[in-house]
Structure formats: C-alpha cells, structure tokens
Image (tube, rainbow, N blue to C red):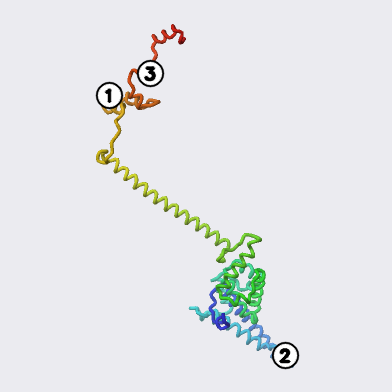
Amino acid sequence: MSEHEQESRELEQNMERALAVAIAHGSSVIQSWAQLAARRAARRNQLGHHAMPTGETAEQIAASAHAVQQRARGELALGRHDANFWREASPEDLVDKIRTDYRIDPARLGHRDHDRAWAERAKGDEVMGLLAVAGRYADDSAVAAGVRDNLTDLLAEYGLDPDELMRMTPQQAAERYVQSRAEYWAPAQPPTMTSDGRDATDRKGAQVAALLSGAQAADDRAAIADRNSTAHLELADSLDASTPQAAGYTTAEPTRSERVAQASTTPAGQAAARAARDHPTNPRAATASSARSQPRARTGATMGADRERGRGM
C-alpha cells in the first residue's frame, strides 16, 4: 500500500477510529498548552525576561499540533455521511461519541496491557489496520507511538516483522498474523482463537449453532419418516379392505375352533371355541386330533385297577 493510499484510506474499524479520535484529542490538548505557553512567553519578553530556550517555539508547537488534529479529523470524516461532525465537533464530543457508539475508551489506547489484550483477541485485519494508523501518526502523537510500540512488541513475540507485514496486502498480513498467533499459543495452552480470528466465546457459539443445526436435521428426518410410515399404513389399510380374491391372494383353511365359533352362537359353543384356541401347547393340533388319541382323565375304576396291578397307590 503506497503512502498516498494510506493517507486517503477511510478509517473502517472501530479501534482505528478510536485511535484517530485519541490523536485529535491529544493534539488539541498540546495545541492549547502551546498557545498558553506562547502567551506566557510573550509576557515574559515584555517584562524583559528571556523567552523559551532553544528549540521549537510555542507557536511552532501549537501550529504542528493543530495540523495533526486537522489531519486526524480529515481521516475520521472521509466517506462519512456525518463528516461535518467529525471535522467541527469539539475533541470532548468526539471522545464521547466513540465511547457511546463503540464502547471504547480512547484514553486507554497506548497502555500496554490494554493494547496487547485487545490484539490477542481481535481479528487480524483489525490489528493490521490499527498498526497502520499508529505508524502513520507515531512521529506526531505520543498515544499513536505507544500503540505502535505495544503492537510491534507483540508481533515480535509471535515471530513477525512489522515492516514485512506492512509491505503485504492487508488480507495477506491479516492471515499471517492470525496464523502466527495461533501457532504461538498452541504449545502452551488451548488456543483462544479460531482460524478466522474469533475468540473462544464465538467458537463456542459456532459449536452450539452446529449442534442446533444437527438437531434440526434429525427432526426433519423424523418428520419424513413419520410421513412415510403414515403413507404405508394407509396403503396397508386399503389392501386389507379389499377382498382376498380381488387382491389375488388365497386364505388358509379355518381351524376347528374358528369353524365352531362361526357356526355356534350359544355360550357353550363359544366356550368350546375359546378352549380349543387357548390350548397351552398346540391349539391347532389339539382341535385337529381324533378323540381316540386325545388324553383322558383317570376315573376311579382305572385308578383301582392300577393299584391292584401294583402300579400306584
């Protein structure tokens, strides 16, 4: 990305905009301090005291701070429908809007723990975007220099060269960062990131979504099986309703109990049919055997004869 393209690129990510607001706010503070220092220096000159020591004068500092602030405001307003707000609102209003809209405190940018904790969880393109903005303003803003140093130190721990990343396309740099971050954390502890830069909470959410999707698919399959079962039952009912001759089937010869039940409507006939049908061994064989071969109850006469022959008590 050329310097011209960097200067004209819209600040798309929330942290990039927060950093630009922090730069504008800090430059405003410096400008105010420098203007006050210039007035004090002017009074001292009037009283015959020496002015500020060698180096830039207060007026030069104020002018430089004003230029940095206007530059940051121009990037904030680029391509925005509310561009006038970002150009003309007070620095305090800009900070309040970032806090309200993005829930980011610009005052925390530049602190080592804050910047590293964010970069360890953010998407790769967001980290590379913030690094680019911080690099552009590092010579003119203390907060930008702090953010740049914090991010470059983290990149060095991941085994990455910031200058090399800035020469890549944003997409290539983001992918390289995410990959190196995952490799860095993998040996020591379970990675807190997925391959696309999402944190552990997002990954768990994806797992839950996958489980819900699988459950929905199972419900769909169950519904299809239920519909098929209903259709099969309806088909079976339609076949049962037709006559055996019409369907091309032959029926087996009715059993004796069935013939008795069909021929007799008296209580005795019905009882006989049930007795034959519910025989404990083989109902069909019991009803089909002859009276001669069926077992008979032992009478008193036969029991007496058995005792006489020595075959019983």
**Front: mark 3 or 2:** 3
Q: Residue at x 61, y 83 (%)?
A: 68
Which residue is found at the position 74% from the left and 93% from the top?
48
Mark 3 or 2, nearer chain start: 2
**Mark 3 touches mark 2? (CB < 8 Å):** no
The residue that disc 3 covers is 295
SS for dot 3: loop
Label 2 crowd (10 A; few <14 / some 14-19 / many >=20): some
In the image, residue 109 sits, relative to residue 28, either above or below, namely above
Q: Which residue is mark 1?
A: 266
Distance of label 3 from label 2 (alpha carbons) = 139 Å
The quarter of the image holding the N terminus is: bottom right
Please tell me whether mark 2 sits on a helix, a strand or a loop: loop
Please name the residue that numbered disc 2 is placed on: 51
Callout 2, which amino acid?
Ala
Q: Amino acid at mark 1?
A: Thr
**Foreground tag (2 vs 1):** 1
Q: Residue furthest top?
A: 308
